[in-house]
Image (cartoon, rainbow, N blue to C red):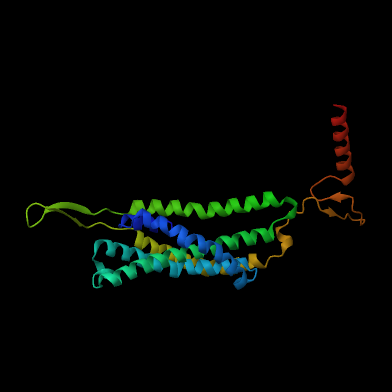
Amino acid sequence: SDNVKFLKAVEFGLSKQTTALLSPTIVLPLGIIVPIVATKVWHNHPLRQFMAAFRFRVTFVALIDVLMLLTVRSYKNNDGIVMGTLNSALSQILFWGLLILSTACQTIVQSLQFNAQMTFFASRVDPAIGGSYMTLLNTFANLGGTWPSSAVMYLVGQLTVPPKCDAILGEDGETVREVCIGGRDAYFPLQLGLSILGCLWVMVMKKRVQYIADLPDDAWRTHIGEVEEDENGETGKERGGGSMEMRKGWWWRTKKGRKNA
């Protein structure tokens, strides 16, 4: 749901120029620094790094996102439980502080998880088909990280009930003021539900992830092209089918046929 928060912030009154300003000032520097620091902290334990970032993402980052959105809505409307009792200076400090903190935390956890993913794939890939193997693993990882965004956007749109708004004349009889009542914003209960599901996933899958991390490198190998010994101790066959002599003969006939052509 962190992919929806900036859409909700714009809906609550945050300008698109402000969201665009956050990318070069916060996202880009952290995207460079975080992977360097991560290698010093987790020392080539990518799945441990991934799980630590995921736990941080579904707990602290989710809480900061909710506080940021409540602050944006209160600051732009100049009311609410967050900004209603604060003066102008404190309101601006709280507004910009939570906005920057929310953006920084999201960038940190995304960089940690992506760096852990790439490090784990690179350390487990089979050298015999390195490029194809890496592409396959990244394809499945990207699919797993992309569809939840579409699902959350769909659920937010389906579960949100817009308020009923009426135009009311002011006391001077000239100005028109819009008053809205009712409605339901599905983002906040959905954020709570998804955070609970994330915590349950961590508790259930923690041992499974550790099991995958402890698998030896040979468990990830396809053994294509490796020479294996037969029952008599001879090494005339390769894994993947066919003897070495047959493969050499096929290659020689193909090369000779090309020269004659």
**Whole-percent x and y of residue 122?**
67, 58
**Whole-percent x and y of residue 256?**
88, 32
**Whole-percent x and y of residue 72?**
32, 63
- Residue 161 in the figure: left or right of residue 235: left
Question: What residue appears at the point 75 percent right and 52 percent down from the top-left corner?
Answer: 128
**Whole-percent x and y of residue 143?**
54, 51
- Residue 146 in the figure: left or right of residue 261: left
Please name whichever residue, 223 or 260, is drawn nearer the observer in this view of the structure.
Answer: 260
Q: In this view, does 229 lie above or below 105?
A: above
Question: What residue appears at the point 47 percent right and 58 percent down from the top-left corner?
Answer: 24
Q: Is residue 197 something that shows in the picture?
A: no
Q: In which quarter of the image is the N terminus?
A: bottom left
Residue 213 in which image quadrant: bottom right
Residue 32 in which image quadrant: bottom right
Q: Is residue 41 above or below residue 256?
A: below
Please name whichever residue, 83 or 193, is drawn nearer the observer in this view of the structure.
Answer: 83
Please name whichever residue, 259 or 225, is drawn nearer the observer in this view of the structure.
Answer: 259
Q: Is residue 139 something that shows in the picture?
A: yes
Q: In this view, does 173 lie above or below 85?
A: above
- Residue 9 in the figure: left or right of residue 248: left
Please name whichever residue, 9 or 156, is drawn nearer the observer in this view of the structure.
Answer: 9
Question: What residue appears at the point 89 percent right and 56 percent down from the top-left corner?
Answer: 231
